[in-house]
Image (cartoon, rainbow, N blue to C red):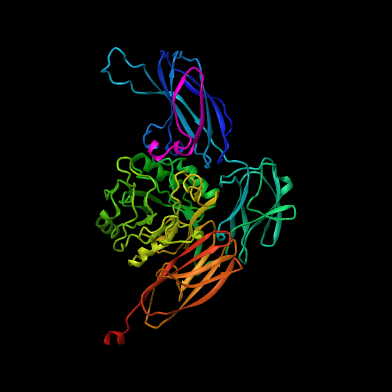
Amino acid sequence: MSLDILRDPKAHCTLCREFTYRLAWRPEKHYVAGTQLEIRSHCLRAFHSWRFTGFRMKGGDITFRWKVRPTVSERWHNPERVLLRARLPYGARQGEAVELELTVIPPVWAGVNNSLSVWTSDVPNNFRPDAPPPQPVSESRSACELTVTAGPVERFSVISRPMADAAGNVRTVLLPEDRFGNPSRFETAVDCELEWNGRRQTLSLRDPGIMELPLSKAVGRAVVSIPMNRLSAQENIANGRRTGDRLIVTGNPVWPAGPGCLRPAFGEFHWHTDISGDGQRPIREALRCARDILNMDFAAPGDHNPQGDQWKATVAALDEFNQPDRFATFFGWENGTDRGHENYYFTEPEHPVRCGGAAGITGGTPDSLIARLRELHGRSDFIAIPHHTNSVAEVRKPEDDSPFWHPYPWGEPQPYIPLVELMQIRGNQEQNVYADAWRGWQQNHGASVQDALARGHRLGFTGGTDNHCGWPGRVCADAEGKGLYPARSVILTGVWTPRVERQAIFDSLKARHTWAVWDTRALVDFSVNGAPAGDELTVTPGTALKAHIRLSAEDALQTVELVSEGRTVWQQSFAEPDIDVEIPIGVADRSTHFYLRALLRNGGLIYASPVFVTVAETKIDKEK
């Protein structure tokens, strides 16, 4: 009849705190003595991320309980996601409550709720030893949901769009967060002071809010001052700078204008929702959070193999949120194989390369699809982006202990692959050997971005998360990062585009006018001899090469480097967060490439796409 929550402890996101739920199952019929009862989890992501530390039951003998920290092998041997199994020694009467207690440590993602259901098995037929064992059957109406919300406020973010809109307004989100980046709320309203463009105003804040600030004539950064004596004993602003009795939070840089007629925009387009079998949270909620929580300019999902009704739901949500000059969406999906993963993106929902579309692609390894994708690219515009190229799957097949997937098979350059996801939850994929600060946790697999560039691939850089929690942009250290990066972490792609509009964003991505950022919203204008990041520059032998870097970040620059063919050709530290420099980088004597990477004092990472330099032969060279 029902599975009810008698006591809801109001669980919030945490790394260690335990919460105890009391449940009551009221059977839909009479069950005889010896009946087996199971409690199962509906959602794969919740099953993996909720930890169960205790089970207690009245009226039943527990015969199986799920481990707090199960191994990968144990997960594979529990495909039904059984949390508890028990025998009912005295049976159960229809409608009479059977009580259970579950003690849990919920995940670090708000909204990754755990849906539970009751399954029952009849008593085995002892009179027929050859009879098959009874199979568990679900009680269709016996289900409940354990919810998890944001924890107490422990951070505060000030997130501005990187440039004013056509009306001259800078959309800015003021965001109380828990320690993991979930949007939270103060216990009581807090009177804060906002400083912008030399002006101050007092705000009463409790929940996340959106403001429209006037255009600044110089590099702008919104500053919020929070009085410590207005915070409760459970609240903090750990990312604030203490000045007197206040905590000061400074937002990301905003430029009054970009290079030429272009504007900077930030977004993320590799995240998964409940449309993916191993993801969670609805796509509409994910898009709302991208737009109104992390204040992105654009977003697109990368769910696994969405077809039929799932694709229709994806298209409907993306079209609903697509608002030219305010927030742009486009379409995409992930093709994950045992020989590398790549995502496909396009601007028309019924594109031939959509999963199960006219091109007939529903899977297949990247190297087996080359001929079909090359032919398709000649008549249908799309982008393929490989990701975690220099990584090997953490999960292994139970039958032979081999990885589920291997590094990306970089072959010959392909016209439909203009970009590579340089950083994501599995770390930095730029090179094969790293210092710790660069977050390169998988090394020496021979499929790094530098390996691809050395093979002649002309790739721009993007940053994605590959998270499966339905929170675009967010990476979570405890769940998928194994504690390697900060508890609150964000990866985004920056793009220079003429408009925040679907086709304009897509064309700018295709042109490689991109940069990737991790835990910063730095603005980067990088060029060589006037050719911007992502472009191809053709020069004659002996041409002097000069790089130009205009960069604004949230903190001082520990190092800014120019890299060519895997080698640092220029490096400098800066005490300021804003720089505008020109750097001689030698004379063109062969075709090569140059890209920018930077490390902030606060740990943030920046990568600007390469400029590809081609040294063309002159008439005299040919005659020689």
Give percent across and percent down for residue 332: 38, 50
Q: Could you tell me how many numbered marks the image carries?
A: 0
Residue at image position (66%, 62%) is 197
Q: Quadrant of the C terminus?
A: bottom left
Q: Quick one: 37 or 325, which is closer to the camera?
A: 37
Give percent across and percent down for residue 437: 51, 59
Residue at image position (39%, 36%) is 74
Give percent across and percent down for residue 323: 48, 51
Q: Is residue 214 magenta?
A: no
Residue 465 in view in this figure: yes
The quarter of the picture where residue 255 lies is bottom right
Give percent across and percent down for residue 32: 41, 13
Instruction: Tell me if residue 553 comes above or below residue 5 in the rendering.
Output: below
The quarter of the picture where residue 510 lies is bottom left
Q: Quick one: 82 or 288, which is closer to the camera?
A: 82
Q: Quick one: 324 or 433, which is closer to the camera?
A: 433
First to last magenta residue range: 47-74
